[in-house]
Amino acid sequence: PTTGPMVEATDDFVARMLDVNVRAQYSVAREAANRMTSGGSIVNLAWIAGVGGGANISAYSSSKSRVIALTRAFAHELGPRGIRVNAIAPGVIDTPGVQEQMEPLRAGGIDIDKRIAANPVGMAGQPDHIARAAHFLVSDLAEFVSGHVLGVDGGSTARPVNRCQAPFDRNRSTTVTRGLTPIDGSLAGDDAGEFEDGRRGKVLRRHPCAEG
């Protein structure tokens, strides 16, 4: 559920969110581990916003980030006992609950089905997608997988790398202007790449953050 503005969230609401999403999964994992005398597999349920956060869902995303933390902590602690611990981080899954929460948006003329399928794969996530991921994580196919958070989100958390965050060394980078010939498959003026300056017979390299 949404939190709304974090400055308006009550302590009771936050406590309830943490109780349901964190304490409950902690307790279930503890009881399961006590009964796994010959090893086993535990799968917790996180969420993609537990990795990246999100506005107006601060309590929910915070609780799911804690699930990720306890999953990794349990993996370290229980691994020597032959117990693997992983988590699934779903994207938006088309369930009756999600449809109900988004009903006000639908009433406002927003295409909810399109919103739910707004991911690189272009599909609406289904509960069965999560079940398949869980089936994999508890199976012998994943016997060397532990402490992992498996995103099942149609690629929603795949973000383009902003290469302009890399340091720009102006002593080693040359601004490339129009008319230079790409010699490594890059498009002149579009991205990083090497270019041949026919006038000077030099090879120049364009830094992706270079101006011009």
Image (cartoon, rainbow, N blue to C red):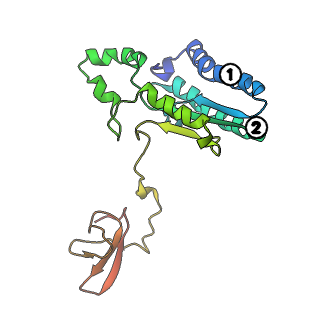
Q: Quarter of the image holding residue 175?
A: bottom left
The residue indicated by pointer 1 is 28
Tell whether 111 sits left or right of 97.
left
Can you say whether 77 is above or below 194 in the image? above
The mark that comes first in sequence, 2 or 1, is 1
Residue, x 49% and y 34% (percent of image)?
Answer: 48
Give x and y (percent) for residue 123: 34, 34
- Position of the C terminus, as image quadrant, is bottom left
The residue tagged 2 is: 77
Mark-to-mark CA distance, 2 and 1: 16 Å
Quick check: 180 left or right of 77?
A: left
Q: Residue furthest top?
A: 12
Q: Nearer the viewer, residue 153 or 41?
A: 41
Q: Amino acid at mark 1?
A: Val
The location of residue 176, given as percent across then percent down, is 29, 72
The residue positioned 50% from the left and 21% from the top of the image is 7
- Badge 2 amino acid: Glu
**Residue ID at (28%, 63%):** 190
Q: Tell me, yes or no, if residue 183 can be seen here.
A: yes
- Residue 83 percent across, percent down from the top left: 72, 36
Q: In percent of the image, x 73 and y 22: which residue is there? A: 31
Per the image, label 1 sits on a secondary structure element best described as helix
Residue 168, which numbered label? none
Q: Residues within 10 Å of mark 1 (few under 14, many from 20)?
A: few
Looking at the image, can residue 54 be seen? no
Question: Could you tell me residue 30's position as x and y percent?
Answer: 73, 25
